[in-house]
């Protein structure tokens, strides 16, 4: 049987961000005494007649074998009573923190694929603001900590599969980079149970074939793996060789923005005004192509030391035209408490978008 040739795109730069024990870490941040206890985010089975499932748990609880999707009653049996604390999940709070984190993502790219409230893929291939992608990843991790008080694990590689493996490799607070020339050695020594998509049912089937790690997986042909596992077998064959050409999938855009990084920094307000005019024209054209308009305009400013300021303003009516976008961006510039002496980056974004069929209507009462 002929094997399908593999095309491996190693040109991309993908970051996978995974918050560490996200829900539990938020509760620990808000109630520091919980950091010394085995915290389980779930309905307390002692008050629900034994019902309830673990949403997540902190790292102390995980040491006792507690994990997400486990019955809460099982956590009750595993953890000493003197240490165990249950907390009801508060998804309103968790979503608010997730929104803060996603706002930081948008400071580096709009190519974002959310996986859950606590993780996402970012395609930063075309990012000109941080030519050094490792520096970008470290900056993002630091900004998440400064903004939310929470830790995250970051994986950086040339595709989504490896970026996810990288973020999982050294949790919590992990920072792992897998370059194209490092990928095969990394995968060859990776235990088979740690390959993404290999679960509790599949791992024993692979081990029965003598497959215990990436190297032994790579020793099996494409035909053998497809015969044994169908479509999943092809995925295993590709992943063993570091191949995953899936793009970062951006969901229906809620914002349209344009930004520029300047080799020669801007040092006068006249230069800033001229650039805001140009950016407003680009955003207006993009909105026209998408037939969208919004009520919120965001200004982004970064200085040569990578200090970033963002300001936003929300109107009662829809904004889409170049003149209106410029006027609001200039108003936001003027509202900055301290204007940078030099500007390395400027950006204008229109958010909260709706189709242009949604019109401004003034009701005269």
Image (cartoon, rainbow, N blue to C red):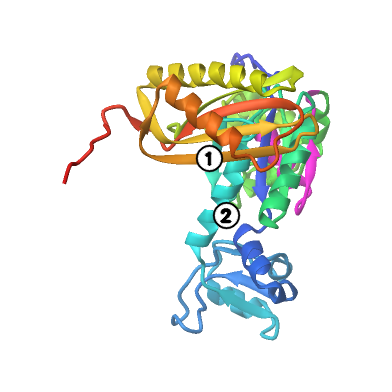
**Could you tell me how far apart the alpha carbons at marks 2 and 1 are, in whole angstroms?**
18 Å
Q: Are marks 2 and 1 in contact (CB under 8 Å)?
A: no
Residue drawn at x 66%, y 39% is: 309
Relative to 225, residue 286 above or below: above
Relative to 113, residue 265 above or below: above
100 or 7: which is nearer to us?
100
279 or 142: which is nearer to us?
279
177 within the magenta span: yes
Residue drawn at x 65%, y 34% is: 161
Q: Seen in the image, is 75 located left or right of residue 34? A: left
Sequence order check: which comes first, mark 2 or mark 1?
2
> Residue 141's spot in the image, x, y percent?
73, 44
315 or 252: which is nearer to us?
315
Residue drawn at x 70%, y 35% is: 339
Element class at badge 2: helix
Element class at badge 1: strand
Q: Residue 302 lies in what quarter of the image? A: top right
184 within the magenta span: no
State whether residue 250 appears in this view: no
Q: Seen in the image, is 349 located left or right of residue 119? A: left
Which residue is tagged 1? Answer: 312
> Residue 334's spot in the image, x, y percent?
60, 35
Stretch in magenta: 160-180
> Residue 91's spot in the image, x, y percent?
49, 61
- Label 2 crowd (10 A; few <14 / some 14-19 / many >=20): many
Which residue is tagged 2? Answer: 97
């Amino acid at each position: 049987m002929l094997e399908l040739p593999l095309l491996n795109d190693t040109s991309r730069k993908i970051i996978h961000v995974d918050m560490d024990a996200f829900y539990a870490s938020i509760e620990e941040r808000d109630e520091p005494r919980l950091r010394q206890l085995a915290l389980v985010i779930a309905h307390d089975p002692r008050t629900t007649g034994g019902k309830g499932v673990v949403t997540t748990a902190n790292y102390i609880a995980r040491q006792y074998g507690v994990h997400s999707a486990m019955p809460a009653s099982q956590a009750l049996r595993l953890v000493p009573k003197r240490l165990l604390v249950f907390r009801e999940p508060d998804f309103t709070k968790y979503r608010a923190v997730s929104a803060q984190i996603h706002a930081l993502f948008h400071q580096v790219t709009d190519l974002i694929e959310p996986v859950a409230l606590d993780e996402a893929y970012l395609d930063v291939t075309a990012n000109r603001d941080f030519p050094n992608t490792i520096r970008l990843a470290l900056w993002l991790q630091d900004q998440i900590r400064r903004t939310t008080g929470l830790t995250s694990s970051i994986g950086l590689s040339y595709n989504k599969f490896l970026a996810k493996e990288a973020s999982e490799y050294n949790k919590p607070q992990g920072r792992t980079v897998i370059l194209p020339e490092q990928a095969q050695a990394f995968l060859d020594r990776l235990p088979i149970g740690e390959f993404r998509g290999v679960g509790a049912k599949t791992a024993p089937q692979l081990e029965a074939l003598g497959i215990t790690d990436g190297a032994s997986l790579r020793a099996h042909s494409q035909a053998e793996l497809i015969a044994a596992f169908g479509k999943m077998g092809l995925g295993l064959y590709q992943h063993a060789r570091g191949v995953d050409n899936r793009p970062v999938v951006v969901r229906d855009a809620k914002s349209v923005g344009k930004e520029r990084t300047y080799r020669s920094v801007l040092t006068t307000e006249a230069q800033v005004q001229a650039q805001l005019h140009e950016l407003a024209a680009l955003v207006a054209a993009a909105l026209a192509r998408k037939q969208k308009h919004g009520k919120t305009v965001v200004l982004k400013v970064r200085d040569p030391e990578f200090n970033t300021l963002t300001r936003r303003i929300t109107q009662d009516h829809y904004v889409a035209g170049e003149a209106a976008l410029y006027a609001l961006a200039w108003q936001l510039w003027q509202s900055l408490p301290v204007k940078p002496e030099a500007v390395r980056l400027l950006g204008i974004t229109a958010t909260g978008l709706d189709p242009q069929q949604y019109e401004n209507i003034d009701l005269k009462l």
